[in-house]
Image (cartoon, rainbow, N blue to C red):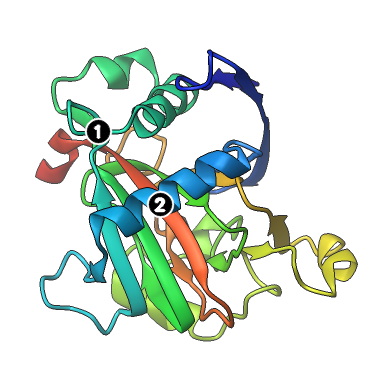
């Protein structure tokens, strides 16, 4: 696949798409961003100023630890052509014409996060009308873990309390899918582990947060976390919304 680089004489970026799980549907976009685009996103965050990151629960700084955040408009006059270009490319790949045509469809501003050593984000389900999540690996440090990916659906509780009790007994690299930076010395060993996928700077992961059988119900297999990091980690997120789902 390819996309065009808006600010670079319409040069194109070639990237590949790999499915890494079927439940939920998780796709890895390798080399989706160029190194210079990663640096530009990081610079946008630093220039705009970063604040202590909270979750959707205002004042909650315990679920996301040792992390700072910046927000960049995804469209409009104050937005970056790079960011809006990423939105356009993602929408064309992962959202159907039916979803794109819905009046309540949209995308949130890009969230850029910098985790310090020990930084993490506990298990959560993006949901809340967010049908699609895209995480961009800005400096190649991974750590995104989907503990219930490709698990038998009948084994997964359909509520948050039950799901969190289940994942307490699971481990990254042994259960689900763990997206890990490939800077580790054990890269070859990890490459042979079906539960671990290595990521690099410029890669992105896209996944759906709702079940695909038309029920408008959350897919708890999409529960994920940002595991504690032993080095500085830069990522960015886009959430694609269908606000009418908030009524279910």
Residue 16 in sight from this viewpoint: yes
Number of numbered discs overlaid on the protein picture: 2
In the image, residue 116 above or below residue 134: below
Residue 38, given in percent of the width and then of the height, sits at 52, 46
Q: Residues within 10 Å of mark 1 (few under 14, many from 20)?
A: some
Query: Where is mark 2, residue-wise?
Result: 43
Element under label 2? helix
In the image, residue 138 above or below residue 67: above
In the image, residue 169 above or below residue 182: below
Q: Is residue 210 left or right of residue 141?
A: left
The residue closer to the viewer here, 238 or 220, is 238
Element under label 1? loop
Q: Residue at x 63, y 52 (%)?
A: 201
Query: Where is mark 1, residue-wise?
Result: 79
Q: Is residue 73 left or right of residue 5?
A: left
- Camera-nearest label, 1 or 2: 2
Q: Residues within 10 Å of mark 2 (few under 14, many from 20)?
A: few
Residue 221, given in percent of the width and then of the height, sits at 47, 58
Q: Residue at x 46, y 23 (%)?
A: 89
Q: What is the CA distance from the residue labelled 1 to the residue labelled 2? A: 14 Å
Residue 66 is drawn in which quadrant? bottom left
Q: Quadrant of the C terminus?
A: top left
Residue 2, given in percent of the width and then of the height, sits at 62, 20
Residue 132 is drawn in which quadrant? top left
Residue 44, given in percent of the width and then of the height, sits at 35, 48
Give the mark nearer the N terminus: 1 vs 2.
2
Q: Residue at x 51, y 56 (%)?
A: 153
Residue 166 in sight from this viewpoint: no
Q: Residue at x 47, y 70 (%)?
A: 226
Q: Quadrant of the N terminus?
A: top right
The residue closer to the viewer here, 137 or 96, is 137
The residue closer to the viewer here, 97 or 11, is 11
């Amino acid at each position: 696949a390819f996309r065009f680089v808006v600010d670079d004489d319409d040069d194109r970026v070639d990237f590949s798409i790999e499915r890494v799980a079927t439940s939920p549907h998780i796709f890895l976009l390798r080399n989706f961003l160029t190194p210079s685009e990663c640096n530009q996103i990081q610079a946008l965050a630093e220039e705009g100023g970063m604040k202590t990151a909270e979750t959707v629960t205002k004042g909650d700084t315990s679920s996301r630890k040792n992390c700072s955040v910046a927000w960049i408009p995804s469209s409009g006059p104050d937005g970056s052509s790079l960011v809006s270009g990423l939105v356009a490319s993602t929408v064309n790949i992962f959202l159907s014409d039916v979803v794109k045509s819905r009046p309540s469809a949209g995308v949130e501003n890009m969230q850029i996060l910098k985790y310090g050593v020990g930084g993490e984000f506990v298990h959560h389900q993006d949901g809340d009308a967010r049908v699609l999540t895209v995480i961009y690996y800005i400096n190649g440090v991974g750590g995104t873990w989907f503990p219930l990916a490709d698990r038998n659906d009948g084994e997964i509780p359909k509520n948050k309390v039950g799901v969190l009790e289940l994942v307490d007994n699971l481990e990254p690299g042994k259960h689900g899918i763990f997206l890990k930076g490939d800077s580790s010395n054990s890269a070859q060993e990890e490459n042979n582990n079906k539960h671990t996928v290595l990521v690099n700077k410029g890669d992105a992961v896209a996944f759906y947060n709702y079940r695909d059988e038309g029920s408008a119900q959350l897919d708890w297999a999409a529960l994920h976390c940002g595991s504690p990091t032993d080095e500085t980690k830069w990522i960015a997120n886009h959430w694609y919304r269908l606000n009418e789902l908030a009524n279910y």
